[in-house]
Amino acid sequence: GQYINVEKAIQIGMLPDLDYDRFHFLGNTSVRGAYMALVSREMRRRVDEVGQMMTYLELSADNTFFDEFNAAMFLPHTDMTQFPSVAVLLEGR
């Protein structure tokens, strides 16, 4: 995602409607995290801690999730209150 056009990503709802300077691209963080876990016992311990904090949620059984998911499938998003800058852009057309 390092070369994502932030403006266009916000317009289609891929990123939240925030100031562009709030987005910072970090590169390949998965490789960096794997490296850290390989060379650091402390990081491996932390990975185990985070794994223990995870909770399984069955989203297919949640009607609210299903409704939100379907609404978010449209480009632009159907809930324009979530994307005020996009609403302004569309009003100008």
Image: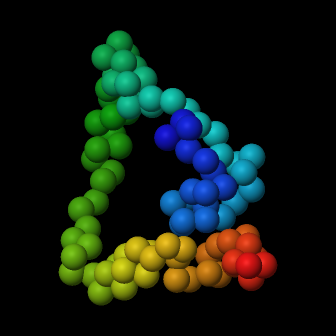
Residue at 54% across, 65% down: 12
Q: Position of residue 29 (x, y in %)?
A: 45, 31
Q: Residue at x 62, y 75 (%)?
A: 82
- Residue in the image at 45% along x and 76% along y: 74
Residue 43 drawn above or below residue 24: above
Q: Which image quadrant for residue 37? A: top left
Report whether residue 38 is seen: yes
Question: Residue 9: image x %, image y %?
Answer: 57, 57
Q: Is residue 26 above or below residue 10?
A: above
Residue 38 placed where, x, y %? 31, 17
- Give the number of callouts: 0
Picture quadrant of residue 49: top left
Q: Position of residue 89 (x, y in %)?
A: 73, 73
Residue at the extreme top: 39
Residue 76 relative to residue 69: left or right: right
Would residue 43 be seen by someone viewing this image from the given angle?
Answer: no
- How is colour applied across the structure in the image? rainbow
User: In the depicted view, which residue is nearer to us: 85 or 32?
Assistant: 85
In the displayed structure, 58 sits above or below 62; it is above
**Quadrant into which the C terminus falls:** bottom right
Residue at horizontal 42 percent and vertical 23 percent from the top: 32
Q: Nearest the camera: 16 or 2?
A: 2
